[in-house]
């Protein structure tokens, strides 16, 4: 099973929940797909065993051969290529390119447009105790995290391992990429009006994608039911609650994941996993 842990906004405790869930499972892999700012390693302190330089193909136009017909530019829906016919000029904007390969496919002139590899970032693999670990590190200056997340997923197991994907925050393309192949999405939300607003945006996205999901409330306080009321109205299960506690916050600041910061941490996360399995089983 692949489970993505997501949140509408940063700072909700998404990573400490993802790390803790992974640590509560016997045969699991924690995957840090928050590739612009991966910080799961701060909690897990993994031994890195392997590093891959991840590349994707981008077009390179040979203006000595190109006829400036414009077919590549017309084909590119991302407007990454501009052909100025009268000036016999070809311009390429790599930050807009999604490496789909269509421009190379439609180019009618042999040797005018070739694909060359462009480094997007690195993917590192390792272990933290028995827990398998992977993280993506996006190169500085890369405009989109999506290709690297897509690349990481090619290396994730589809065997008996439970894969916990720590998604980037927000509701844009990288989040879609980090969730779309997962069997379940665990949403981490704070019980505040801001937290609710961002949770609702993510829920709306995931409903469009038809993803099964459930909510963990972080920094939960007795009497504050803002998230529970929303979950009930939306027909979403609340799978767990992590209390607001100074002790948890202090341990978090020392790099101790929430599962080890609470006396009953292991029970809370075992219960969350059990609830996820039941929700998936019941459709
Ligand atoms: S399709 Fe090929 S020949 Fe035409 S403008 Fe693009 S690179 Fe040049
Ligand atoms: S590879 Fe795709 S996205 Fe990139 S320039 Fe070519 S058509 Fe556009």
Image (cartoon, grey):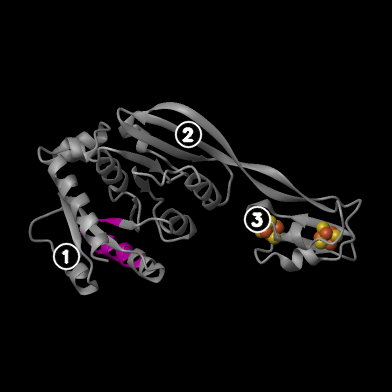
**Callout 1 crowding tier (Cα within 10 Å): few <14, some 14–19, many ≥20:** some
Q: Is residue 36 left or right of residue 4?
A: right
From the viewer's perspective, is the residue at label 1 or at label 2 nearer?
Answer: 2
Residue at figure coordinates x 8%, y 61% from the top left:
223
Q: Secondary structure at mark 2?
A: strand
Q: Quadrant of residue 29?
A: top left
Q: Is residue 166 left or right of residue 217?
A: right
Residue 190 appears in the figure: no
Task: Give the quarter the ligand 2 occupies.
Answer: bottom right
Q: How many marks?
A: 3
Q: Which residues are magenta?
A: 186-201
Q: How far from the left and from the top, in percent, is residue 258?
A: 21, 40
Residue sitting farthest toward the left: 223
Q: Quadrant of the C terminus?
A: bottom left
**Callout 2 crowding tier (Cα within 10 Å): few <14, some 14–19, many ≥20:** some
Q: Quadrant of residue 227?
A: bottom left
Q: Label 1 to label 2, Cα distance in Å?
A: 38 Å
Residue 277 appears in the figure: yes
Q: How far from the left and from the top, in percent, is residue 87?
A: 89, 61
Q: Is mark 3 within 8 Å of ligand 2?
A: yes
Residue identifier under label 2: 124
Residue 243 in the image: above or below residue 208: above
Residue identifier under label 3: 97
Residue identifier under label 1: 228
Q: How far from the left and from the top, in percent, is residue 230?
A: 21, 69
């Amino acid at each position: 099973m692949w489970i993505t842990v997501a949140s509408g906004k940063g700072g909700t405790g998404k990573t400490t929940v993802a790390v803790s869930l992974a640590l509560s499972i016997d045969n699991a892999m924690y995957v840090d797909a928050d590739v612009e700012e991966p910080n799961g390693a701060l909690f897990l302190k993994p031994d890195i065993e392997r590093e891959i330089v991840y590349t994707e193909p981008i077009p390179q136009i040979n203006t000595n051969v190109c006829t400036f017909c414009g077919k590549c530019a017309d084909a590119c829906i991302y407007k990454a290529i501009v052909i100025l016919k009268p000036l016999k000029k070809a311009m390429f904007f790599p930050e807009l390119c999604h490496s789909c390969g269509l421009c190379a496919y439609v180019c009618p002139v042999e040797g005018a447009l070739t694909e060359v590899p462009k480094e997007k970032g690195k993917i590192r693999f390792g272990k933290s105790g028995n827990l398998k670990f992977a993280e993506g590190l996006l190169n500085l200056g890369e405009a989109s995290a999506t290709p690297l997340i897509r690349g990481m997923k090619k290396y994730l197991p589809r065997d008996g391992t439970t894969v916990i994907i720590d998604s980037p925050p927000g509701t844009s393309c990288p989040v879609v990429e980090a969730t779309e192949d997962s069997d379940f999405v665990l949403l981490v939300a704070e019980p505040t009006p801001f937290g609710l607003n961002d949770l609702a945006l993510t829920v709306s996205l995931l409903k469009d994608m038809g993803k099964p999901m459930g909510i963990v409330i972080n920094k939960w306080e007795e009497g504050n039911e803002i998230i529970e009321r929303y979950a009930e109205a939306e027909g979403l299960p609340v799978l767990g609650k992590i209390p607001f506690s100074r002790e948890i916050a202090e341990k978090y600041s020392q790099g101790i994941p929430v599962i080890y910061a609470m006396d009953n941490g292991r029970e809370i996360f075992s219960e969350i996993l059990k609830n996820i399995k039941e929700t998936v089983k019941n459709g």
